[in-house]
Image (cartoon, rainbow, N blue to C red):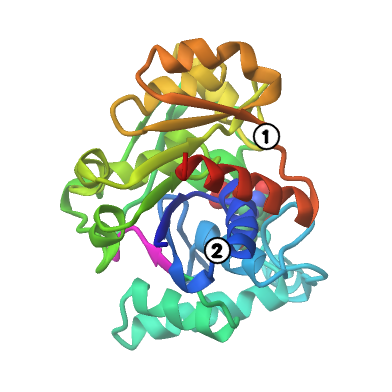
Amino acid sequence: MQVTVLAGGVGAARFLAGLVQCVDPAEVTAICNVGDDLTWHGLHVCPDIDTLLYTLAGLEGPDGWGLRDDTTITLDALGAVGGDTWFRIGDRDLATHLRRTQLLAEGHTLSEATAALARALGLHLQVMPVTDDPHPTIVETATGDLPFQEYFVRRRARDIVTGFRFPGAAAARPAPGVLDAIVSAESVIIAPSNPFVSIGPLLAVPGVREALAGSSATRVAVSPIVGGEAIKGPAADMLRALGHDVSAAGVAALYQGLIDVFVLDEIDGALAPAVAALGMSPLVCDTMMRGDDGRRRVAARVLSALHT
Ligand code: FO1
């Protein structure tokens, strides 16, 4: 069975880590957000891709990103000579960015560089950026427009969000295999990721939303909002600031017309009728991905919904 996952950062990585325990990884494709990418001291850094690669390799750091037990000797030395250190790149993580930047400088695409890194980490699923073209997320805030990592890490998501822009979107082309992976999969799963800054940039690439809307796959989304709170990150604050319902049903409404099944946590079971009213089948289950077992359990439950 071919399964395609539209993926953001930590939530998506944990879901995929469960999925590859339930399905042959060779049948799994992850389409990744590149809106969070940044140039860091001249290096091309792809936080969401790396979070996915490291988590699937079982190497992720304590907060879900970066590498476990990494050190910051280079970062500290960089600070000592006056370099910016607000974005915390560890010593071993640095090797990934050096390698990716080298591959890009040699003329490889981001898709090729990503596939090479996935292979080097011994992964068997397909990991692809949604586009090989520059496609940054700009967060519009009450204090001005900010590139995603400036908003999220440097300013600690403290600014009031008024909207999002994807200035590269119009010229961005889906990376090779992206549209096919959506159209020809038996299932497409929107991971429990931020609908605005993780899934939004994927759907903004010309052709991607249309491919999902027209796909004959069973299309499932897993709520990143549980009990009115984001499992991780600023999704709840963004829903609130933009006037949406701060709930799983509020997220479901953003995916209306794109999704057949919407998965919400059992503590949100009372929202099932509101989800059904949007034209989606609600699936109510425990969506908390605590530990390895939790990841596998959530993936297995979502997969079971595809066969009913
Ligand atoms: N998140 C932070 O909160 N602070 C950091 O200094 C930071 C560094 C970092 C380095 C590499 C990487 O792959 C991710 C990193 N992240 C950091 C996480 C990242 O900003 C976000 O989790 C994602 O972009 C949102 O999905």
| First-in-chain label (2 vs 1) | 2
- Of 139 and 73, nearer the camera is 139
Which quadrant would residue 70 be assigned to in this image?
Answer: bottom right
Q: Which residues are magenta?
A: 127-133
The residue that appears at 58% across and 22% down in the rendered structure is 237
Q: Is residue 26 left or right of residue 258?
A: right
Amino acid at circle 1 = Ile
| Image marks 2 and 1: residues in contact by CB distance under 8 Å | no
Which quadrant would residue 178 be assigned to in this image?
Answer: bottom left
The residue that appears at 24% across and 57% down in the rendered structure is 179
- Of 261 and 174, nearer the camera is 261
172 magenta-colored: no
Quadrant the N terminus occupies? bottom left
Residue 8 at what x, y percent from top left? Answer: 50, 49
The residue that appears at 32% across and 53% down in the rendered structure is 135
Which residue is tagged 1? 231
For mark 1, give the secondary structure: loop
Residue 305 at what x, y percent from top left? Answer: 51, 40
Amino acid at circle 2 = Val
